[in-house]
Image: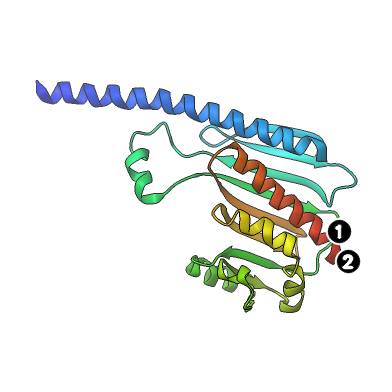
């Protein structure tokens, strides 16, 4: 008898958490989407959305002529707030909502580069091996927080010598998980963790500033 009561109680709890989590994710996604729309509209001739993964969404932005990118694609993925097990596991996994951005340049760039959190040593080794990049070594304070891998160390040094760009990236060091330039695909890629809607805006600011800075190096 007690076992049946416990099973029904657990089922009811899972159901309640599911609906509350679904409601929270929908509300959070709307806030994220509104921020993306408001922040990208001045740069874009078109901003469109479609659903993506567990309450998240994807966005495509067709950029205006004056911008360095032809288009930017974004994907916002949300943690599994509908699942009761997410909450105890999150204490261990530290899962966060995530934003991924892909920006496709109008002109080619002379460099492939990866900027990764300094603590992600295994990821650094993996990316360096997969992409054939070399570790950039410097005494600059920036390199105390981020590992930099590049196809050309001289150009990478010049690229990251811009103090304003460094400042933008360092201000978001707790959120940026990967910032990547691909010479072959003429593309900028960013992965960042989200804490609230304001972090969406801040990550997009870093992304756009990095794209604008690339103009100085484009061929």
Residue 17 pos. (x, y %)? 36, 27
Counting residues from the start of the chain, the first of labels 1 and 2 encountered is 1
Asked whether residue 44 appears in the rendered view, the answer is no
Q: Residues within 10 Å of mark 1 (few under 14, many from 20)?
A: some
Q: Is residue 81 above or below residue 65?
A: above
Q: In this view, does 202 lie above or below 2?
A: below
Q: In which quarter of the image is the C terminus?
A: bottom right
Display colour scheme: rainbow
Residue 80 pos. (x, y %)? 44, 37
Q: For numbered disc 2, what is the local secondary structure?
A: loop
Give the image quarter of residue 43: top right
Q: For numbered disc 1, what is the local secondary structure?
A: loop
Q: Quadrant of the N terminus?
A: top left
Which residue shows up at 24% across the image and 27% down it? 10
Which residue shows up at 49% across the image and 66% down it? 119
Res 107 label: 1
Q: In this view, does 86 lie above or below 15?
A: below
Residue 62 pos. (x, y %)? 81, 40
Residue 210 horizontal side relative to residue 54, left or right: right
Which residue shows up at 73% across the image and 64% down it? 163
Which residue shows up at 50% across the image and 30% down it? 25
Question: How far separated are the C-alphas under marks 1 and 2?
Answer: 7 Å
Q: How many labels does the image show?
A: 2
Q: Name the residue under label 2.
A: 219
Outermost right residue: 65
Q: How crowded is mark 2: few (under 14 residues within 10 Å), some or many (20 or more)?
A: few
Give the image quarter of residue 40: top right
Asked whether residue 138 appears in the rendered view, the answer is yes
Residue 71 horizontal side relative to residue 192, left or right: right
Q: In this view, does 161 lie above or below 79?
A: below
Query: Are the two marked residues, 1 and 2, in contact with CB atoms closer than 8 angstroms?
Result: yes
């Amino acid at each position: 008898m007690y076992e049946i009561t416990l099973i029904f109680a657990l089922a009811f709890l899972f159901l309640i958490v599911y609906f509350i989590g679904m409601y929270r994710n929908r509300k959070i996604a709307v806030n994220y989407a509104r921020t993306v729309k408001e922040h990208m509209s001045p740069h874009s001739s078109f901003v469109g959305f479609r659903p993506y993964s567990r309450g998240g969404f994807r966005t495509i932005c067709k950029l205006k002529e004056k911008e360095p990118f032809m288009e930017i694609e974004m994907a916002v993925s949300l943690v599994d707030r509908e699942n009761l097990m997410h909450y105890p596991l999150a204490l261990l996994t530290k899962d966060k909502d995530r934003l991924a951005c892909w920006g496709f340049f109008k002109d080619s760039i002379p460099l492939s580069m990866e900027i990764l959190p300094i603590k992600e040593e295994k990821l650094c080794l993996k990316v360096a091996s997969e992409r054939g990049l070399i570790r950039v070594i410097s005494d600059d304070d920036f390199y105390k927080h981020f590992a930099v891998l590049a196809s050309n160390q001289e150009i990478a040094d010049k690229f990251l010598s811009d103090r304003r760009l460094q400042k933008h990236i360092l201000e978001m060091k707790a959120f940026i998980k990967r910032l990547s330039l691909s010479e072959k695909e003429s593309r900028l890629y960013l992965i960042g963790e989200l804490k609230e809607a304001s972090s969406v805006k801040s990550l997009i600011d870093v992304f756009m500033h990095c794209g604008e800075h690339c103009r100085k190096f484009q061929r």
